[in-house]
Image (tube, rainbow, N blue to C red):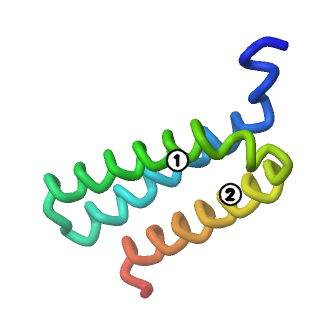
Amino acid sequence: MSFIDEYKEFWGLLIFGNIENLVLSSQGAVAGVDPIILGGLSLLAVIIWFLIGTFGTKVAIKYARVIEFIGGLAIFILGLQSMLEAINIL
């Protein structure tokens, strides 16, 4: 079994994790957070995702669909919140 086939179920999680990081970064930029702090926190989030992916894959493989759904839902909610804040509804 190749590397790509072995972790095929986690491609969505990888993509959602990166998109989630971008959404959180854009929320920080809209809120006026210091760019240096925002960059450091963004880098920390990427490292945490890397560690979770590296060490947690064997444990989490049976929960891949649930994790992907929760990640997608979080991205949707955060994206919606970001858009509403950007147009000053919230």
Q: CA distance from mark 1 to mark 2?
A: 9 Å
Occupied quadrant, residue 35: bottom left
Q: Is residue 89 above or below residue 24?
A: below
Earlier in the chain: of badge 1 and badge 2, it is 1
Residue at figure coordinates x 68%, y 57% from the top left? 72
- The residue that mark 1 highlights is 19
Image height of 1 relative to 65, above or below:
above
| Viewer-side residue, 64 vs 88 | 64
Cβ atoms at labels 1 and 2 below 8 Å apart? no
Residue 79 shown left or right of residue 66 in the figure: left
- In the picture, measured across the screen, residue 18 lies left or right of residue 34, that is right
The residue where tag 2 is placed is 72
Q: Residue at x 62, y 64 (%)?
A: 76
Residue 68 makes an appearance in the image? yes
Q: How many marks?
A: 2
Q: Considering only vertical position in the picture, is 1 above or below 70?
A: above
